[in-house]
Image (spheres, grey):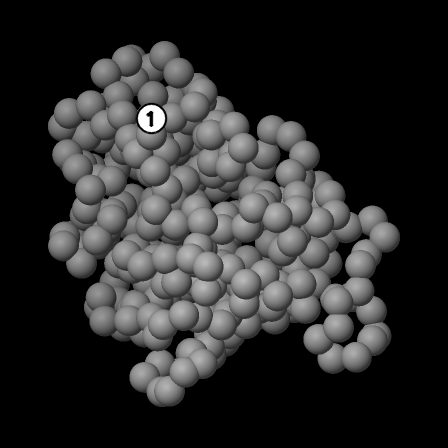
Amino acid sequence: MDTTRTGPSGPPAPHGRPARAAGAALGTTVVAALLAACSTGGGAPGAVEPTATGDPAEGGRLSFGLGYDPTCLDPQQAGGNDSLNIGRQLVDSLTDQDPETGEIVPWLAESWEVSDDATRFTFVLRDDATFADGTPVDAAAVQANLDGVAALGARATLGASYLDGYVETVVEDESTATVVFDHPSAQFLQASSTMTLGLVSVDSTDLTADERCAGDFVGSGPFVLADWQPGGPPPWTVATTTRGRRRSRATTGPRTSTASTTRSCRSRPCARAPWSRASSTPS
């Protein structure tokens, strides 16, 4: 294979991550909810108590207060910031983008190679990542997800543009997948860091688009959907709970996050919440 670049890459082309920052209405409410979730002491309910070390903690509940009632919780279909920021908690992505440097860094993929003409992207996956149902995040899952996004067509509001020219995903082996385009795709490596191309389980790709919009899918992220009550009067809320084992984002340097104490990041640094520019204690 003609490959010349390996991850992590340099700064990507400016095609934008659509939901790196949320709207003002979401920001105030959600950050407050995260801070409450990060409480580790035995004070009053909802009280925020600082931690001495900032070490990540297992478990917790994350409640979102939203500015409008989402119409779809599937990040591969959603186009609005409120919906996408919920989806970010439910799915991990092949790569991450450092919010300060713009560098693409490993996440579910620990390395990658890009061909000279930017038509073939080969990802080598971590061997410890699982979906919430315990099934592995492997090359077959990458194939099922990207084929599924392409099949969604216009329902994949953002994904359809990210996969412009998509031909196929080739399963090289259990942990290696090559994504093929029929013309150069300068944007795809950056697009692989978005929640829109976040991964759901193979079985979830077989669900109907409407079932997935209702939240009936199994994700690869740190949280699983606990409750969503759409269609009622405001305030609208979506509640998620942490699942057993968290596969952290692998980063190239220390990062901080107001959400990091709700995640078990094992021996690797936690990453900043994708819509939060604020920092608290080092993770």
At 51% from the left and 37% from the top, the residue drawn is: 99
How many numbered marks appear? 1
Instruction: Choose between 120 and 237: the one closer to the eye.
Output: 237
Residue occupied by mark 1:
13
- From the top left corner, tell me how far across and down residue 190 is, in percent: 36, 33
Report the side of 117 relative to 217 (left or right): left
At 71% from the left and 75% from the top, the residue drawn is: 46
Report the side of 45 relative to 270 (left or right): right
- Please determine whether, in this image, residue 182 is positioned above or below residue 260: above
Instruction: Choose between 144 and 228: the one closer to the eye.
Output: 228
The quarter of the picture where residue 88 lies is bottom left
At 83% from the left and 49% from the top, the residue drawn is: 53
Look at the image and tell me in which quarter the C terminus lies: top right
- From the top left corner, tell me how far across and down residue 112 is, in percent: 42, 26
Q: Secondary structure at mark 1?
A: loop
Instruction: Choose between 9 and 279: the one closer to the eye.
Output: 279
- From the top left corner, tell me how far across and down residue 129 is, in percent: 52, 48
Q: Which kind of residue does numbered mark 1 sit on?
A: Ala
Q: Residue furthest front?
A: 24
- From the top left corner, tell me how far across and down residue 259 is, in percent: 63, 56
- Please determine whether, in this image, residue 24 is positioned above or below residue 19: below
- Please determine whether, in this image, residue 16 is positioned above or below residue 246: above
Q: Residues within 10 Å of mark 1 (few under 14, many from 20)?
A: few
The quarter of the picture where residue 41 lies is bottom right
At 19% from the left and 30% from the top, the residue drawn is: 181
Look at the image and tell me in which quarter the N terminus lies: top left
Whether residue 58 is visible here, answered yes or no, is no
- Please determine whether, in this image, residue 116 is positioned above or below residue 134: above
Whether residue 278 is visible here, answered yes or no, is yes
